[in-house]
Amino acid sequence: MALRLEDKKAIVAEVAEVATNALSVVAADYRGLPVGNMTKLRAEARKAGVYMRVVRNTLARRALEGTEFDCLKDALVGPLLLAFSQNEPGAAAKLIRDFMKTNDKLQVKALAIGGKLLDAKQLDAVAKLPSKDEAISSLMSVMLAPVSKFVRTLAEPHAKLVRTIAAVRDQKQ
């Protein structure tokens, strides 16, 4: 069924709005993927905070124009599924990577993060990016390490004195 001009404008506006707020995008070829599997992928995407849309390439090019994902223009060839990460940069890549383990029909064509076009081979690297909570916790542990080491260093002379006195007491008994 052909789309009317108003429908096309609405799709372009919707995808453009999502693209301006997104952190990363994955473009994947979905040819041969059964409808049931596609429905399952969409449900998992909603749970993970990933906006997923199948858009005509000409409309996608217009929607991505002026955003940091403008670099994807040349990679938009064939039937593609666009997955935009809304909250975490690696969310869409993790979703697609995990889904590809059980469905070999889904093939990543390109991905972009921070305005840079990445090859499909770098999907694992993007998928391994830590979530916001993981990054904050590792940063806090790095920041806490010098403080805790300093406290242990300050407490060590007193602890050594107590151990020495206890050893002398044990020797005299």
Image: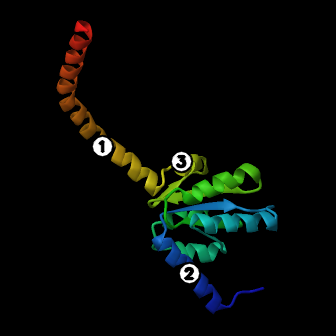
Which is more N-terminal, label 1 or label 3?
3
Instruction: Name the residue at the front extreme.
Output: 173
Q: Which mark is residue 160?
A: none
User: Which three-letter amino acid code belongs to the residue tagged 3?
Assistant: Lys
Is 139 placed above or below 95 here? above
Which is more N-terminal, label 2 or label 1?
2
User: Which three-letter amino acid code belongs to the residue tagged 2?
Assistant: Glu
Q: Quadrant of the C terminus?
A: top left
Q: Position of residue 65 (x, y in %)?
A: 50, 73
Residues at marks 3 and 2, CA–CA distance in whole angstroms: 28 Å
Residue 40 left/right relative to 96: right
Q: Determine the residue positioned at 18% across, 20% down.
A: 161
Tell me the element at label 3: loop
Q: Quadrant of the N terminus?
A: bottom right
Count of labels in the image = 3
Tell me the element at label 2: helix
Q: Which mark is residue 14?
A: 2
Q: Position of residue 47 (x, y in %)?
A: 62, 66
Image coloring type: rainbow
Residue 54 left/right relative to 149: right
Along the viewing direction, whichever of 79 and 86 lies nearer the viewer: 86
Which is more N-terminal, label 2 or label 3?
2
Label 1 sits on residue: 144
Mark 3 or 1: the one toward you: 1
Residues at marks 1 and 2, CA–CA distance in whole angstroms: 43 Å
User: Which three-letter amino acid code belongs to the residue tagged 1?
Assistant: Leu
Q: Is residue 92 visible?
A: yes
Label 3 sits on residue: 128
Residue 163 left/right relative to 101: left
- Cβ atoms under marks 1 and 2 closer than 8 Å: no
Q: Position of residue 88 (x, y in %)?
A: 49, 60
